[in-house]
Amino acid sequence: MSAFYPYATLTYERCEQLALFSQDSSCMDRRYLSKEHQQTNHQVMLWMQAAGMRTWQDEAGNQWGALTSSKPDSPTLVLGSHLDTVPNGGKYDGILGVLLPISLVQYLQDTEQSLPFNLQIVGFGDEEGTRFGATLLGSRAVAGTWQENWSALVDADDIGLPQAMRNFGLDINKIRNCSREQAIDAFVEIHIEQGPVLEANNLAVGVVSAIAGARRFKCTLTGFAGHAGTVPMHMRQDALAGAAEMILAIEALAKVHQVVATVGKLTCLSGATNVISGKTEFSIDIRSENDAQRDIAFAAIEQSIQAIAHNRNLTLQICQTHSANAVLCDEALQNKLTQAIVRHGIRPFALASGAGHDTMAMANICPVGMLFMRCEKGISHHPAEAIRTDDVEQTLAVLNHFMQTFHIPKQT
Ligand code: HGY
Ligand code: MN
Ligand code: MN
């Protein structure tokens, strides 16, 4: 066991503690600007303060901690990830990328080591976009790419984003104050891989080369509700049967165009056993590391599902709810992370991320890098998401090597 082992168990135990802050006692579900988000920010603030960091919560509800260098005009490195989860999600997606850096700062504090640059840690409030549909709200506020039309967003209980922010003690009109352009010289995110590649290569960590770009849509399909017993099959305008045909077409076209496309949500409005569906809503999430390839695939999907709607005498409305282009990680940061992995005696390995991350938003204002940590069987967005303490120990050691040898050029 290395000097990092106690800090690995500390990180693991804290992930377990934060998992208690969930709106559903039967599973992990922590949403932006909720009571559970508030509890989590407070607990993370206490852990940051215990590690000697100055703390604050910004106007978007992101939780920050700062360790200021003895030379205040030094460059600033930010480490961070998100504190929200998907419904029925795991305990480590995002959360590990906030708690592991705090544990490393605790180690530096306990071993009386200082850094030649300013270090900040951020827990973003909304990466998953579960509550309001748009994603990366916390990191986009920091990156200065908050979108004015987000003021119209409402959640499943018809609570608007501005009201939810007021309930949280925030004022949406001040959101521009938390933009950190020019104040951050590099951003690095530690995150579980959420895929099987590191485990298949028997590696604890890997360096992320690129992050797939994503587009998300809300589709509303309208037919005509009818009596399940009296309307002949050839006279139906069945919105659920239409959605079913469209979902299979989306799956087939994703394979043809070598992208990933997912229909994760399907709602049959006013559904009843003996009623032909008159209206359904479903989501589309389409991704690729190649934005052009993704857009060509989506154009083919759109043409196909509109044709299905036409043939079934249905009307289909497609509304884009999210778009983020693919992001290449900074070469210099990738090299520094690779050198730290080699110095720790692990075989260096680079891989792309199919999952989206706050890093995509931060790439708008500074060089970005990501370090992936293995998760068991690559399972994520699922309660079976699991990590190993010894992998956390290795990741802490690699991150420490990275920090000890890291020189950031001040952004001009
Ligand atoms: O959907 C994603 O890729 C991320 O987990 N929000
Ligand atoms: Mn996620
Ligand atoms: Mn995540």
Image (spheres, rainbow, N blue to C red):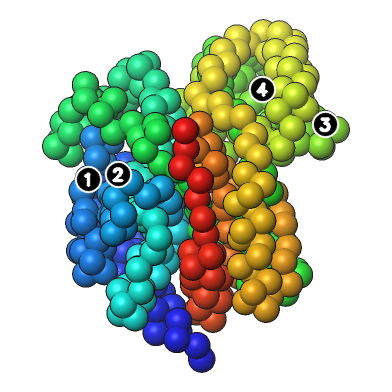
State how far apart marks 4 and 2 are (Cα).
41 Å
Element carrying mark 1: strand
For disc 2, the marked residue is 62
Whether tag 1 and tag 2 are in contact, CB under 8 A, the answer is yes
Viewer-side residue, 143 vs 14: 143
The percent coordinates of residue 212 (x first, y second) are 66, 39
Examine the rendered structure and indicate whether residue 356 appears above or below residue 150: below
Q: Is residue 304 left or right of residue 59?
A: right
Graded by Cα atoms within 10 Å as few (under 14), some (14 to 19) or many (20 or more), the crowding at tag 3 reads: some
- Mark toward the start of the polypeptide (1 vs 4): 1
What amino acid is found at the position of numbered circle 1 in the picture? Gln
Please name the residue shown 47% across and 33% down the image: 412
Residue on which disc 4 sits = 242
Q: Mark 1 near mark 4, Cβ–Cβ under 8 Å?
A: no
Dot 2 amino acid type: Asn
Dot in front, 3 or 1: 1
Separation (CA) of disc 2 from disc 3: 37 Å
Q: Amino acid at mark 3?
A: His
Check disc 4 and report its element: helix, strand or loop.
helix
